[in-house]
Image (tube, grey):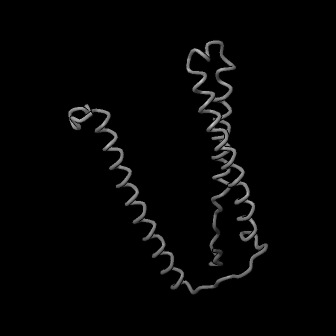
Amino acid sequence: MYVDDGSPRKPREPVKVAITFVVLLLGLAMIAWPFLWDDGWAQGGGASLLIGSVVFVFGLLLFLFYRGRARVERHPLKGENVLAHWHYDPLTWEQISQKEVADLGMIKVASGILGGLFALIGLIFVFVDPKKIFPCF
């Protein structure tokens, strides 16, 4: 949604394009690693080739996806192909912004708690013998 509130909005899609391009290059480096060093195959080159191929394919798909989205997002910010403009008074716009920020804040807090819980469970399984916790194994 494009809202003309007078404030400049930075597009996020070009940043995503740059990040996925770096991931794509990382995949290429992982693919090339066993071929560039003499001892590459003995040092896990096959795994690097396999994982690098997967990283490269996903990086390429995401790069193409975000590049297309960046192109589409660029038009309304330049004022091209805009179907409608919304003009809000500053008080209404402030209320909308505060509600959106509050909703995003709760999502971030819930995600942090859930991520911490998963990390804690993972650490428990790393440092504690599962046979002691689950005797049936």
The N terminus: image quadrant: bottom right
Q: Looking at the image, which is closer to me, 95 or 19?
A: 19
The correct choice, above or below, for 29 with respect to 24 in the image is above
Q: Position of residue 118 (x, y in %)?
A: 35, 47
Q: Quadrant of residue 114?
A: bottom left
Question: What is the residue that sits farthest to the bottom in this orientation?
Answer: 89
Q: Position of residue 17 (x, y in %)?
A: 67, 51
Q: Quadrant of residue 12?
A: bottom right
Q: Is residue 102 left or right of residue 8?
A: left
Q: Position of residue 64 (x, y in %)?
A: 72, 51
Q: Is residue 71 left or right of residue 31?
A: right
The correct choice, above or below, for 78 with respect to 133 in the image is below
Question: What is the residue that sits farthest to the front in this orientation?
Answer: 136
Q: Position of residue 20 (x, y in %)?
A: 65, 46
The correct choice, above or below, for 70 with respect to 24 in the image is below
Q: Residue at x 62, y 73 (%)?
A: 7
The C terminus: image quadrant: top left
Q: Residue at x 64, y 44 (%)?
A: 58
Q: Looking at the image, which is closer to me, 65 or 79?
A: 65
Q: Looking at the image, which is closer to me, 110 or 45?
A: 45
The correct choice, above or below, for 54 with respect to 88 in the image is above
Question: What is the residue that sits farthest to the top in this orientation?
Answer: 38
Q: Quadrant of residue 52?
A: top right
Counting labels gives 0
Q: Residue at x 72, y 54 (%)?
A: 67
